Image (spheres, rainbow, N blue to C red):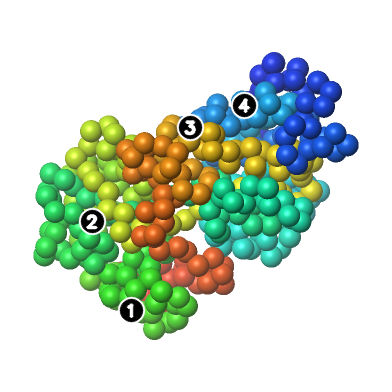
Amino acid sequence: MPPLIMRPASVAAALLALTAGASAACYPATDDAPLESELVIQGTGGTYWDKFEAIVAGPFEAECGVDVTFTVTPNRNLNELRALIRRGGSPWDLVTINTPWDLQIGTTEGLFEALPEGFWDPVADSLAPGAFNEYGYWNNAYANVIIYSTSEFSEAPSGWADFWDTEKFPGPRALQDSPTNIIAALIADGLSPDEIYPIDDEKLARAFAKLDELRPEIRAFWTAGDAPVQGVAKGDFVMSSAYNGRAFNGIAAGYDIAIQWNENILSTVWGVIPAKAQHPKAAQALMVFLNRPEIQKQMAIETGYTSAIAAPETLVEPDVAANLATSTEHVAKAIQLDGAWWTDNIARVQSLWREWVTTGSVSL
């Protein structure tokens, strides 16, 4: 079992957990089937999870009488979860899955507990289509957006084609170290979002040929989320892909950068219950509790991210909505990852991407 970093729950919440019937008020608890008195959540640590603890877990403890503990695992790893379950069970009751292909793989392999039939029915009207299913929900959604230097350019790039246009927008670029860049390359090469999938070898070759065009201007393949924001702010490059939340924080800090949301590549972190979890009903209750509008409003304000709630822009001021990947406007501009295709092809495409980054060529 990996090392656990535990954060103790409040004394007040622990006392509430002893109150008869306290959990019955929290769906899906009933008087005959109350929630378990404990819940262990796996998170990655950092500011987001600190806010989650304060905005979600604290009120959940107080209202539902469940003692919530956090386990910090900075690197989400499906292989680790698989091994734990096969050895007898996960130490966590609620975990986060960072990619659509890991969600698909884990579902296929039976690594997640299915929710009761009709579980989402009481709240489905308040949630975004596609943001929940029989295994879980969007814990938070994020977008890979284009950021650019406002000190270098007075005109915003319109999308990935302009990101590739080094005559109109001269200067060095950065891209995330990720094979999902083949989507940006295909869009830059003229495909529309509905023409992307399925990605066959012809499209793969087309994507890498387009990446070849930009290669001389690529100064970095970033892995840390702050790297592109800091790089554009310092002038190391004039444009980059970036996580929307990190970019918005940079703007709030006064950096001379701006975001282009057109053709953002939308991805989602899913919350699911591992197979053989010890406190599944408490985890189910938290899934619903955190998607309350008042909770999601505060999460949007404090973190720049929301969960499965529909139309979050109706809950917050326009300057906050401008940061949300889940706003109706930004989702309409998004290119979503096809989980089924990436599940079937991730190993090969990851290998091709690594070959191209390392050697500048690809075996196709």
- Residue placed under numbered mark 4 in the picture: 59
Residue at the farthest bottom position:
202
Q: Point out residue 343 in the picture as x, y percentages from the top left corner.
A: 56, 67
The crowding category of the residue bearing disc 3, from other C-alpha atoms within 10 Å (few below 14, some 14 to 19, many at least 20), is some
Query: What separation in Å lies between label 4 and label 3 (alpha carbons)?
Result: 12 Å
Of the numbered discs in the image, which one, if any, rests on residue 298? 3
- Residue placed under numbered mark 1 in the picture: 206
Question: Image point 45% across, 75% down: which residue?
Answer: 197
Query: What separation in Å lies between label 1 and label 2 (alpha carbons)?
Result: 20 Å
Q: Point out residue 182 in the picture as x, y percentages from the top left corner.
A: 37, 68
- Residue placed under numbered mark 2 in the picture: 173
Q: Earlier in the sequence, mark 2 or mark 3?
A: 2
Query: What separation in Å lies between label 2 and label 4 (alpha carbons)?
Result: 43 Å
The crowding category of the residue bearing disc 1, from other C-alpha atoms within 10 Å (few below 14, some 14 to 19, many at least 20), is some
Query: What separation in Å lies between label 3 and label 1 (alpha carbons)?
Result: 43 Å
Secondary structure of the residue carrying tag 4 is: helix
Query: What separation in Å lies between label 2 and label 3 (alpha carbons)?
Result: 35 Å
Q: Earlier in the sequence, mark 3 or mark 1?
A: 1
Q: Earlier in the sequence, mark 4 or mark 3?
A: 4
Secondary structure of the residue carrying tag 1 is: helix
Asked whether the beta carbons under mark 2 and mark 3 sit within 8 Å of each other, the answer is no
Query: What amino acid is at disc 4?
Result: Pro
